[in-house]
Image (cartoon, rainbow, N blue to C red):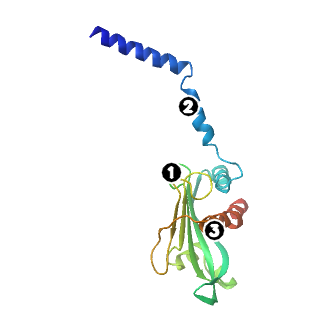
Amino acid sequence: MKQRISGLKILLAFLLLAGQQGAFAPAVSAKDKSAAADPNDLTFRLYQLLDGNYGGKLGNFYLITDVYRDPSSPQEELQHILRVDYDKDRGFGKLNIYVRSVGKIQPDQMKAYTTKEFYEFGESDQEKFVKTDPGPLGKTGDVYLRAEGDRPLATTPITDDARKSYETILTQYLIPALQKK
């Protein structure tokens, strides 16, 4: 029994001494360096803006964006409405961007309804982007959902088109709108 205790004491003393000497520090610091985000990354810039100007939380921010032609009915114009939700303390899905469509909004309608009401007129989401960590869309933990036809949102592979759509939302609409607010 004495031999066993003394062996445990030696192991414990070794681990304690190694920890004080920084023997485990290189492994930890190497991990931290690889996790450093690119300051030019769009998601990183958005997170910095939301953390600095909005206290790390943005609940149900609505935004009217582009006008486009309905692919199934080219004479009809539609407009995208975004709902954005962000919480830096969430472990997964810190950023959620929901995309809906409504008929093209007329100037008199803008006076009568709020952006949230326009979003609710859309009835169902067409797309949803979920980001946890900075970096391009498609990193581990990112999710892209898309509705096809009358079906509800479903997980869809992240393609170059999805990445382009995400980047367009951030660069042309979301970041500029949050900087103005």
The secondary element bearing badge 3 is classed as helix
Q: Nearer the viewer, residue 129 or 52?
A: 129
The secondary element bearing badge 2 is classed as helix
Q: Residue at x 60, y 73 (%)?
A: 81
Q: Earlier in the sequence, mark 1 or mark 2?
A: 2
Q: Residue at x 58, y 64 (%)?
A: 84
Horizontal side of 147 relative to 181 (left or right) equals: left
Q: Earlier in the sequence, mark 2 or mark 3?
A: 2
Q: Residue at x 69, y 83 (%)?
A: 107
Residue 115, quarter of picture: bottom right
* Label 3 Cα neighbours within 10 Å, binned few <14 / some 14-19 / many ≥20: few
- Look at mark 1 in the image and give the residue it sits on: 90
Position of residue 90 relative to residue 11, above or below, is below
Residue 165 numbered tag: 3
Q: Earlier in the sequence, mark 3 or mark 1?
A: 1
User: Residue 129, percent across and down?
Assistant: 55, 63
Residue 27 numbered tag: 2
User: Residue 8, percent across and down?
Assistant: 36, 15
User: Residue 114, percent across and down?
Assistant: 60, 75
Q: Nearer the viewer, residue 118 or 31?
A: 31
Looking at the image, which residue sits at the far bottom? 75
Position of residue 22 relative to residue 44, above or below, is above
Label 3 or label 1, whichever lies nearer to me, is 3
